[in-house]
Image (tube, grey):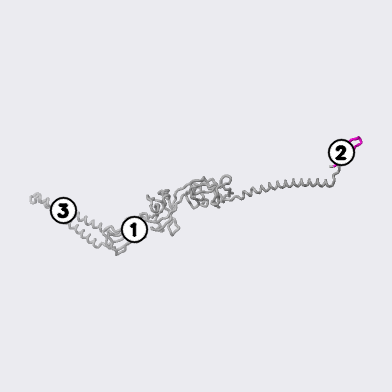
Amino acid sequence: MSYETTIDDNGNTIVKDATLTPQADADARRRRLIILAVLAAVVLALVAYFLLRKKEEPAAVNQAPAVTVITPGRTTVEGVITATGSLAARREMPVGVVGEGGRVVSVPVDAGDWVRAGQVLAVIDRSVQNEQARSTSAQIDVARADAELAQANLDRALKLVDRGFISRADVDRLTATRDAANARVLVARAQYAELIERNNRLNIIAPESGLVLTRAVEPGAVVGAGSAALFTIAKGGEMEMLAQLSESDLASLRTGVTAQVVPVGTDKAFSGQIWQLAPVINDQTRQGTARIALSYASELRPGGFATATINSGSVEAPMLPESAILSDDDGSYVYIVGPENKAVRRRVTLGIVTDSGIAIASGLNGSEQVVQRAGGFLTEGETLRPVKARRPN
């Protein structure tokens, strides 16, 4: 820089800036522009950095996988056990020949008929037995006549004994004769009654009221005491289902529990109750039998197949859909959303299985956010973006 020196009127020296040259002035302006440009660039870089950082933060959040979660809460679950089995008469009574048997002359009932106690199911020819009964009846008359004659002889002897015409020994003999004659009357009557009872047993009769299930005899057949059962009757028409259950299911039931039975071939359900639980388990199938009592219905045919839905009680527990539950060699587990939206693997114990889901016996209290589906693609500790599942309308 150059300076200009002058002296004023008082003799003082004055120093002034000399006028800059055009080249120096241009350089100065250029330097100022460069400095301003650098400052502007720094400011723009800072602004861009903060703007980009704000955009990257939600982008990082959006990159976390979205998962549908549900909060199960606690629900009262009605336990249901499904079992299969066959239908049968609850009290099946085989009816056969009681007496000596013979030729069947008529069968007035057929399978499917209702009968009452004492009703004749089949009639057996008794022509010979009837003649024997008439002979025995005549023997009663003979014995009675002999007894009357013996009594008359004794009465006459008693009148003569005081006159000395008859000895006391003769009276005793006549008395014994009279007693023997009376005894023969009783024997004849007993023989006749026995024969009548035998004849009555020739007919096949119903021991109890009920429904005739089978008929295995036709007129003309010859039957005897060794013959197989001629009829099968369901006492009172009562039926039952023999439901086959596993050991664990059988242990959770008790008598009196209600059940719904649906026979194969129909959609109609019949209400019943368990009246007996098998005291033993089949060592081959490892199953036991629950006997479900049923009232008569034409759709319930013994020997048929049926499905039973048995109420096994109620529990209060979280309920999850099947899609939320995973399993491995260690058992069942679910994924829940933990702190900082991290995936947490939780071991669970399964309970009652229903049409609406599976009850969780242990492992959850119901307040957790459980991953509803796609848990098999998650890893523990992974950041998640939970989305609440929509409730069904």
In this rendering, does residue 369 appear at all?
Answer: no
Q: Secondary structure at mark 1?
A: strand
Find disc 1 in the rendering and name its residue: 232
- Residue appearing at x 61%, y 50% in the figure: 63
Horizontal relation, residue 304 to residue 157: left or right: right
Q: Amino acid at mark 3?
A: Ala
Membership of 14 in magenta stretch: yes
Give the spatial CA distance, label 2 vs label 1: 146 Å
Q: Residue furthest left?
A: 164
Mark 3: give few (<14), some (14-19) or many (20+) Cα within 10 Å: some
Point out residue 239 in the picture as x, y percentages from the top left corner: 38, 55
Mark 1: give few (<14), some (14-19) or many (20+) Cα within 10 Å: many
Q: Where are the magenta residues, as a range?
A: 2-17
Find disc 2 in the rendering and name its residue: 15
Q: Nearer the viewer, mark 3 or mark 2?
A: 2
Q: Residue furthest bottom?
A: 220
Which one is nearer the viewer's eye here, 63 or 4? 4
